[in-house]
Amino acid sequence: MSDEERLQLPLKSYVLCSIPRTGSWLLAEGLAKTGIAGKPDEYFSAGRELHTHDGNANGPVSSFAEYVKHVYSVAATPNGVAGFKVHPEHLYYLVFRWQLLSCTRHSTFREVLNEIFPRACWVYSRRHDKVRQAVSWWRSIQTRQWFDIADQETRPRTVEPEYDFDAIATLHHRIISEEATWFEFFAAIREMPLVIDYEDLSASYESTIAAVLRYIGLAQDAPASLPPPRLRRQSDAISDDWVYRYRRESSGHG
C-alpha cells in the first residue's frame, strides 16, 4: 500500500515555511481566499492536536496517524489541494510525533517528511529587513497583538510597549539563525523552495499570490481577482523610531 493510500492524502499539497513577522499569515490568508489552494494553517503543534482530540465533531482522534488524516481533511479545498503553515518548532514536533509510530520509528527526518508530504511544494516566507522584523516581533510579544484585522474591533492595549535594545538584538540574532536553519533544512531534504519576500507581498499582494499559485500548479484555475486582505499593516511611527534607534545603537556596539 502506498503512503498516499495509507494516509488517504490528496495528490497535491504545499507547505508554507516561515518564522514570525514575515507576512506568512497575510500570504496564507490570500492563498485560502482563492478557494483552490487549500486552507494553510498551523496544524502541527501539541496544543492543536490536543484540541482536536478533545473537540473533534466526528469522534476522538485515537492516534497521530489519524490526526494527520484529519489535518489533511480540514486543510484541503474541494479540488483536493491541501495547504499547511509551519515554523521550525512545528516541523520538529511533527517529525518527532511521526517517529513515535512503531512502523516509522527508524525513519530519517527526510523520510518522515516524504511520507507525510509526498510530492509537496515548499514555499518559504521571509523578510529582507530583519531589523524591522525584530522590532515588530518585540512589540507583539509585549502587546500580545499579533494581528490587526480590518473587520474586527482592535482590542485596547493593556501594556504600552517599551524599547529594549537587548531584547530586539536577541530576536534579530534569532531571526538570522532560524533563517539559516530553514535553508539547511531545505538542503537536507533536497528541495528548493519558492521564496516569497514580505516586501514584495506587501507591495504587490495579488501578483505575489498568483506567483505561488503558478508554482504549485494552479495558475489555470486562479480567480480573476482577490478581495483586499483583512490583515492591516501594524508598523507605525513608533516602529520607525525603534528601527532608527536600534541601528544607531548597533553601530555603536560594533
Image (spheres, rainbow, N blue to C red):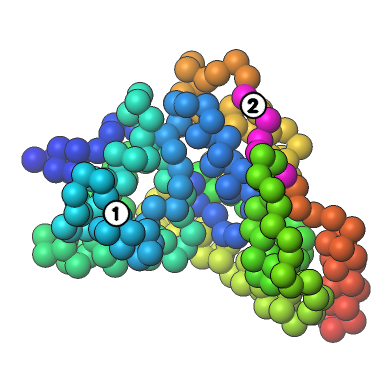
Query: Foreground: 141 or 93?
Result: 141
Picture quadrant of residue 83: top left
Front residue of 56/33: it is 56
Where residue 85 sits in the image (x, y, percent)? 46, 49
The image shows residue 47, relative to residue 18, as above or below, that is: below
Residue at screen point 22% across, 58% down: 64
Position of 72 compared to 242: left or right?
left
Label 1 – label 2 distance at C-alpha: 32 Å
**What kind of element bears circle 1?**
helix
The three-letter amino acid code for the residue at tag 1 is Gly
Mark carried by residue 55: 1
Residue 16 at x, y percent in the picture:
49, 46
Name the chief secondary structure element in magenta.
loop
Q: Residue at x 75, y 82 (%)?
A: 166
Looking at the picture, how far across and down is residue 197, in whole percent? 66, 46
What is the span of residues highlighted in magenta in the rendered image?
Answer: 226-232
Q: Which residue is mark 2?
A: 227
Give the crowd class for mark 1: few <14, some 14-19, many >=20 residues within 10 Å: few
Vertically, is 60 above or below 241?
above
Which residue is at the far left?
1
Q: Quadrant of the N terminus?
A: top left
| Mark 2: secondary structure | loop
